[in-house]
Image (cartoon, rainbow, N blue to C red):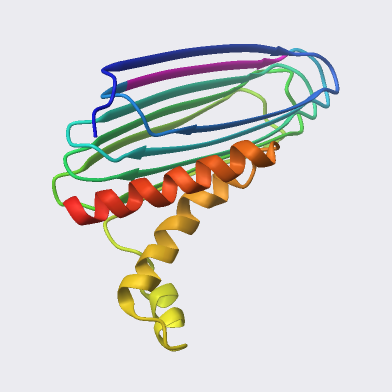
């Protein structure tokens, strides 16, 4: 399957006081994908949620995601979930920065990155970063990179009579579906889930 060579995406958002913004991104195409997200909260009691899922389904495909969230005011809230599946010789990159400035007291910010490598030649580079100047905050970040699915989850399926391949397919699908299910438009969500299922099937055959 041919894919176009380059996709670049730059997103810049300034959020007003007490506003709420939810961002959901699903990306599977192009040989090289470079996405830049820059979000700044301009007032107190502002909420930001970012969810992304990237799939490198072709050899030598690169997904490069850079995000920056700046919190300048009290009682800001943010949650980020970034997920990636790398197949073949695919390469995934995530550079995520949360900046909590001096007046952003009582901020609650969390960032989580989860990556699966389905091939020994796949590569993922993850760089989560917290910059905190305020002293009354609750901020967390975590990154998990794995070449295997959770054996307890596989056992759960197999203990109920589900064969290993079907169980693996279901778990891989649900890994991406966690983000896709957050798409607020049902027609788009349905199309993205169908594409995920198709691309995972092709990628599993080629690995």
Name which residue lies at 38% across and 68% down.
Answer: 150
Magenta-drawn segment = 33-41
- Is 158 displayed left or right of 204 in the figure? right
Front-most of residues 162 and 142: 162
Is the residue 99 above or below the residue 202 in the image? above
Q: Position of residue 165 (x, y in %)?
A: 31, 72
Is the residue 76 above or below the residue 13 in the image? below
- Is 43 displayed left or right of 131 in the figure? right
The answer to whether one can see residue 207 in this image is no
Is residue 114 highlighted in magenta?
no
Is residue 39 highlighted in magenta?
yes
Name the magenta segment's main secondary structure. Answer: strand
Q: Quadrant of the N terminus?
A: top left
Q: Position of residue 32 (x, y in %)?
A: 28, 21
Front-most of residues 76 and 191: 191
- Is 67 displayed left or right of 59 in the figure? right
Q: Position of residue 147 (x, y in %)?
A: 26, 57
Name which residue lies at 35% across and 64% down.
Answer: 149
Question: Disc count in the image?
Answer: 0
The answer to whether one can see residue 177 in this image is yes
Name which residue lies at 65% across and 15% down.
Answer: 40
């Amino acid at each position: 399957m041919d894919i176009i060579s380059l996709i670049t995406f730059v997103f810049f958002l300034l959020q007003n006081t007490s506003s709420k913004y939810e961002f959901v991104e699903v990306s599977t195409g192009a040989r090289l994908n470079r996405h830049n997200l820059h979000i700044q909260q301009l007032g107190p009691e502002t909420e930001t949620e970012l969810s992304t899922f990237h799939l490198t389904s072709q050899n030598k495909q690169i997904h490069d995601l850079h995000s920056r969230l700046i919190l300048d005011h009290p009682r800001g809230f943010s949650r980020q979930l970034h997920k990636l599946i790398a197949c073949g010789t695919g390469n995934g990159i995530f550079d995520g920065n949360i900046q909590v400035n001096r007046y952003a007291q009582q901020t609650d910010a969390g960032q989580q990155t989860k990556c699966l490598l389905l091939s020994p030649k796949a590569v993922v580079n993850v760089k989560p970063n917290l910059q905190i100047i305020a002293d009354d905050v609750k901020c967390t970040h975590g990154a998990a990179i794995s070449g295997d699915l959770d054996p307890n989850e596989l056992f759960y399926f197999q203990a109920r009579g589900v064969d290993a391949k079907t169980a693996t397919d279901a778990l891989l699908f649900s890994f991406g579906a966690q983000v896709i299910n957050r798409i607020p438009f049902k027609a788009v969500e349905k199309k993205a889930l169908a594409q995920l299922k198709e691309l995972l099937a092709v990628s599993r055959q080629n690995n």
